[in-house]
Amino acid sequence: MEKKYISTRNQQKEINFYQAIVQGIGSDGGLLVPDFDFTKMDLEALMKLDYVDLATEVLSTFVPEDGKELIHEACKNAYGKGLFPKNVVPVKKAGDVFVAELFHGQTAAFKDMALSLLPYLMTLSLKQLNEQREVMILAATSGDTGKAALEGFKDVPGTCIKVFYPLDGVSMIQQQQMVSQTGNNVKVIGIHGNFDDAQTAVKKAFGSQELKEASDKHNVFLSSANSINVGRLIPQIVYYFHSYFELVRNNEIKLGDEINFCVPSGNFGNCLAGYFAKQMGLPVNKFICASNKNNILTDFFTTGKYDANREFYKTNAPAMDILVSSNLERLVWFMTKDGDKVRSYMDKLNQDGVYEVDKEVFEKIKDQFKAGCLNEQEVLETIKSCYNETGYLLDTHTAVGYGVLKRYQHESGDDTKTVLLATASPYKFPESVYKAIYGEELNVYDAIDKLHEKTGVMIPKPLVGIKDREVLHKQAIDKSEIVDFIKSEIEAM
Ligand SMILES: *Cc1c(COP(=O)(O)O)cnc(C)c1O
């Protein structure tokens, strides 16, 4: 059976893996999903593998039969060449919670897990398709995607990358990481607007006839590094298996026991990858989807209604500040397997800012996904109490997960062993973390030094000396200018 992908909105079908990677998003504005049954994995065999081979086995179930060698090469390049520690994702303990640290890549955030691999998936796909045109990668970022994508794509032949970030919506460290980015094919542009504005404009660019014509004329095409790309999603399946096996290896559980995963969520890509892992046979009881004050996902998972008519808050966990959670569309597709229905939901969302799934769909969702949210004050209190009680230093995003998990455990009595996915290093948000524990407001660089001095927790290599890096990108435009800007970049090629 050939493995084909389909758009969640049903109007594009029958495309293969390589096309899905290169294209990024469905031609009808939907997201691309596998139109084949997930492969049930042999847990016992997988458990013996190191991360590179585990990733190869998991990922090659998504590509054409003869693609396994290519995937193996890509996984080796991404995870096996010293950009990550040896076992890639260390699993630690904070009290009785297992913490899978996804932040040991090049930018100290979990986006590295997928964005270290995506450029390799992109170049191998371009080759398979015999594509001669240059690819222009567009990425809207709430902070972490941008830097991770820039690191991944810098100086990759045949590609260039433009990253758009909200000027007031990312942390100091995230901004400094991006504006100091080197590479001959990279541009970083600040946006007057929030992340949703940037994401919406980039999605619009993909649907624009005008840009399509300009691209054709200049022998380039647009693709996406956002988590709408399947190439972002599927690498994330791997660490669900990996962390599960770590628990088995450490005699915390027996192979076959069910565990829970708690996931600090924004665009819902991370959590959705966990759902894929479960479909592939990973024994998962519940997913606990954690949100900050922007709690649209919490409301969705408790009511079945997705209502974006609400205020947008800038919080101390900015990578989770979101109103339109793109990957939820994929979950709804899997729960309905009905693209016409998904399209009608998304049309409603576009027109009225709200949709509600059918009752039986909601029942299915509710059964597997629990949800909760924390406000900013609760985030700070969680960082402090976790550090004082367990000695584990949480970043603001992971703290959202930890706090939501503790409340869920208390309220539900569910004592299933749980892996919390740690999505960023505490040193990416050092002012908030320092203030949470020691009560003092410091500037960002002092906070890094003091936090290290007092806790002894290692500063990640990518953040050492960041203060002194030269600012190379100063451009800023209004959110309304994004599409025109992309057009002029295309015309300059
Ligand atoms: C992107 C990000 C998230 C949210 O992940 P999604 O896959 O968008 O749900 C959470 N925490 C951090 C630090 C992130 O960078």
Image: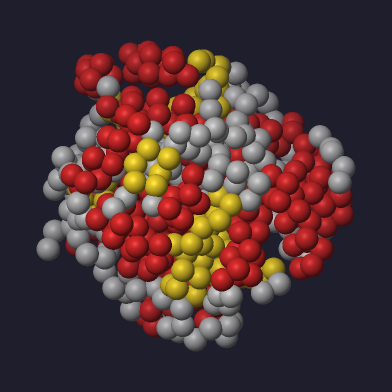
Q: 34 left or right of 148?
A: left
Q: Is residue 13 above or below residue 281?
A: above
Q: Nearer the viewer, residue 81 or 146?
A: 146
Q: Is residue 383 above or below residue 486?
A: below
The quadrant in which the N terminus is found is bottom left
Q: Nearer the viewer, residue 73 or 57?
A: 57
Q: Nearer the viewer, residue 394 or 425?
A: 394
Q: 245 left or right of 403?
A: left
Which residue lies at the image location 21% right of the left edge and 55% below the top edge?
Answer: 337
Q: 216 left or right of 442?
A: left
**Percent x, y for residue 471?**
65, 24
Which residue lies at the image location 28% right of the left edge and 60% below the top edge?
Answer: 360
| Residue 62 in which image quadrant | bottom left
**Percent x, y for residue 57?**
34, 68
The quadrant in which the C terminus is found is top left
Q: 343 left or right of 463?
A: left
| Residue 376 in which image quadrant | top right
Q: Is residue 482 above or below residue 379?
A: above
